Image: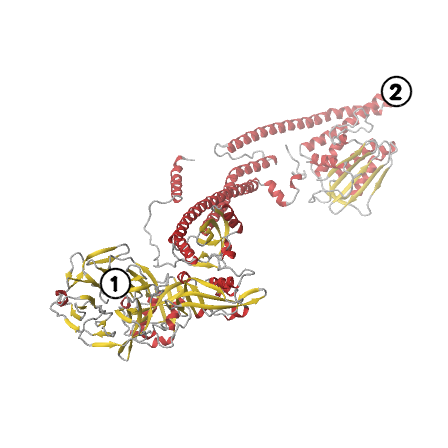
Amino acid sequence: MRPGALAPLLAVAALVAGCASIPTSGPIQQGPEVPDGQADQVIRVIVRPPQPDMTPTQIVSGFIEASASFEDDHAIARQYLTADAATSWNPTVGTRVYDGVPTLAPNGPADVDMTATLAGSVTADGHFQVSPGRLLTESFTLDYVEGQWRIANPPPGLLLARSDIDRAFRSYDVYFLDPEFTTLVPDPRLIPANGAGLATSLMQALAAGPTDWLAPAVRTALPDGAGLAVNAVPVEEGVAVVDLDASVRLVNDATRRALSAQIVWTLRQVPGVLAVDLRAGGQALPVPGATNPQPEDTWRGFDPNAMSADAMAYAVRSGRVVEVTGPAPRAVPGGAGLGAPPLDGIAVSFDGNHIAGLDEQGALWAAETRAGAPTVDLIRDPGQSRPSFGRGTSAWVIDPQQELKQVLSDGTVFTIPVEGLSTKIRMESVSVSRDGTRIALVVRRGPHTFVMLALIVLREGAARVQSPVRVDARLTTVTDVAWAEDDRLIVLGAEGAGTPAVYEIDLARAAVRSLGAPPDPLRVAAAPGFPPLAASADGQIYSYAGGPWISAGFGGSPAYPGG
Amino acid sequence: MTLGPTSPPAPRTRTARTGPRPTRVWRQSLLLRVTVTTLVLSLIVVGLLGLLLLSRITTGLLESAERTAITEASAGLSDAQRLSSAADTGGSTASPSSIVDTIVASLATRAGSPPQYDVLLLADDAELSGAPERGTNLVSDESVPPTLRDAVTTSGRQSWTYTEIRYLDGRAVPGIVVGAPLSISSVAAYELYYLFPLTEQSSTLDLVRSAVVGTGILLVLLLGAIAVIVTRQVVAPVRSAARTAEQFSEGHLSERMQVRGEDDLARLATSFNEMATSLEDQIHRLENLSAVQQRFVSDVSHELRTPLTTIRMAADVLFESRDAFDQPTARAAELLQTQLDRFENLLADLLEISRYDAGAAILDLETVDLDDLVARAVEGVRPLADRRATRISVETQSTPLPVECDPRRIERVLRNLLDNAVEHGEGEPIDITLGGDDDAVAVTVRDHGVGLADDQIQHVFDRFWRADPARARQTGGTGLGLAIALEDTRLHAGMLDAWGRPGQGACFRLTLPRRADVLLDASPLPLPDDGENHDAPVDAVVLEDAR
């Protein structure tokens, strides 16, 4: 070989060797868009079919445990039943949830009584409702079938432990609208974690309408009777395809926008969904102001947790209302900032333009936050509760006669009827949700104070409050409540005889989580996207950002707009 | 070496041409043999290398997966132990289910999203204790082999094995399962199993396997192509050398190989050419020598004729007046006359032979009947036969046997054969058989005299050869008769075969093509004992000789 032929050969060899090694540099390359919120892992209960010669108690215990396994439509649980009961038993009508471990006691040779603390129930449409303090009793009758005991009378629905709910269900919000179609209202649902087709389940839930409890307070933009034309919502490459009935084409532009917001907000919770392709009768449904498919962030304006860009925290310092913007608080313009009269227990309207508060006697005063605006007294009677604004500009208070009052900014006072509240219960304070559809009440029953959630229902132009329900079963000494988000409450209270602390309550599954507390907390304030604030008896305001409570300066009665 | 224009085509390397065609092609083509051998050997080598490579990669991948699995499982186990002891000391009233849930949830979180592995928390005796058991996602508890469960519970240590991980949706993938005992004292004795699917390793292996197989096939094909190219480089000159050598052997003595470059093949070509030149020189020299000899014989014969004629005339005078001589002188004149006859015959035969050697013999073809030629030849030898009391029988065919030949020469051949038969026939009868088919006619002359041995048959056509040098010549044969007969037969593109057995006599067979365009390969008449193989070498000898 000629030496001249060696050079190109060496070059080729070097090139090939380069291809075979791991590069240390290269062009910048773009990855695919990563959807937020991957599907988390499901923990599955491994259950065993009945063993030979089990006692009736063991059979009942095995059945209750096997109910927690959702595979094959509870096939293993059905093995604990007699043949008739196995075919007739319907586990889907609802779930009763108990705390701890149930007590099983034989009651005669073929009967077993089950007793447990009832924690609540999950309706068939996925709404979780706590039922504190009740007992769950169930009596099982067993038959002796082919030499083995089998349950003959399984109660309809499932009996699950609280831990089963936490493990086997995921909470998702199905979104509906407030009566004015201005904001979305979440309707939390518990959906079995191992169920396939989450997008389909959510859209079916949306088409079926709000849960019975929430229904009076919200509206849906979906026309009556209209549902899914194709009863499935396939998700392909991040786009969920929703095909509604052709009748949806008849609705006006505003309704189309509201409907789109409902659907996009509901489906964006599904892992991997980045956009929604909205169709009606098979053809794309044009929505003014939106492209199709609609990206998941199309309907920011309907965000139930949206706060205005200049929202900030407020507090009271030496009787003056100040903006907590940093180390040097600034008094708000107008009478409230001047401290004439000195106010406490303040609330700030959602738009930040109105401030309401109580004077030393508990009379309700209000002022606009503009220079020169005077402080006006809205209710002269003393002993009013701390006001709350919610979405509008009218303040809600409870007067000493246990009447719920809605006070407009011009001083007009409406008495809002409260329905469904036991006469043994006294209302102590209120907090209206920022979407204006729900109201959280701190109520007292005997020695205990706790939080109840009720609906604000507009009927024939008049508002009323109805259907109050407990939101948790643990807190028994509650002094204050605030809305952190549209489905999360911040509560100042204590479990039993414990020391007061700040808790966060997830309304979807009534889960209570302690956030700790500053020393001697008095009041709390919360808002979406802002850290919870707590006023302490030491005259300081503390802020919570995931770790310990840290001081945000001197002051009291913290408040966020809309609180 | 000059070849007569009538020499039959040489059947070249007859034995090498036998056998079925593929075998022949295989044996004859060096290119095919080298290519196929290279392909087969490289296939074996590449296959072995591929297997080695794959097994190394598999081992490496699995070792890495094993390490990861064991490390991850150990970390998870300590995590679970910490959580379970926390649940023990917490003094809380958490139900067994919630404790187990907490542990599994914590372990599941470690698996990442999407999960790299699945976790199973199985109670030692779930049927009896009713202890809650958990698994992540869709993994089935049947994925854990019972042997591994036994090993974990009996040894009390972390154990692992390969298994098929089964899922509730029916999927099953190969994987590693690592198990360890985990005692949650407030609940029950558990085993914690980590199940690592090896789908990624399996797909990597698939990739590597396809790469190795593809590369291997490509490599083998390339090696085959290289073998073809290289072999052609060697074979092409060799083939050209073989062609040159063949041409050379066919008499094209000026044929030479092309010499290109300075490599081994060039050296071979140079040597070949030198050899060819040397051979050519030798052959030319021999040819010249042969020509000189022939000329010499011819010249001597001619030169002898003139004085012989004079001697003849003088001898005739002496012979005719022998009665006037006394007895001894008369006997001498008779002897002179007889020996002069032999001398003349010998001279004539020598001249004839020298004509053949000079290639000057010319055929004077006409179509005659073989029977007539035989009859004339028999008449010719009749006096001699009568003297020997030899009976000659002719077995002819019912149909005439016309043949295109030079009747003078063929008659001479037959005369020679008959003379020979009478001379060596010991007075026994001589059988002449005629035969013919579409292509050829044949005559066999069979005597029952002293016969011929195998080694004698080889020389029977040689010039001046005698079976018994001591034997007296009775008929005055010149010793050139059979040689001339063979030359005549060759001139006709015929065959002259001899057969003999000592004491049983001899048989000569003349086979002639009926027309000049016929190529003989067999005779219409058999030689005696044709069924046996004794004549085969004879035939071969004659054929060799004929060549």
Does residue A95 appear anywhere in the picture? yes
Q: Secondary structure at mark 2?
A: helix
Q: Are marks 1 and 2 on the same chain?
A: no
Q: Secondary structure at mark 1?
A: strand
Q: Compared to A424, does B30 lie above or below?
A: above
Q: Quadrant of the N terminus of chain B?
A: top right
Q: Residue at x 63, y 29 (%)?
A: B287
- Residue A497: image quadrant is bottom left
Percent x, y for residue B40?
55, 42
Residue topped by disc 2: B327
Q: Compared to A294, does B181 lie above or below?
A: above
Which amino acid, by three-letter code, is at mark 2?
Answer: Gln
Q: Which mark is residue A526?
A: 1
Q: Residue furthest bottom?
A: A460
B193 and A357: which is toward the camera: A357
Q: CA distance from mark 1 to mark 2?
A: 177 Å
Percent x, y for residue A560?
22, 64
Q: Quadrant of the C terminus of chain B?
A: top right
B89 and B173: which is toward the camera: B89
B12 and A362: which is toward the camera: A362
Which amino acid, by three-letter code, is at mark 1?
Answer: Ala
Q: Which mark is residue A150?
A: none
For discs 1 and 2, the disc positioned in front in the rendered view: 1
Query: What chain is tagged by disc 2?
Result: B
Q: Compared to A529, does B381 lie above or below?
A: above
Percent x, y for residue A223?
35, 76
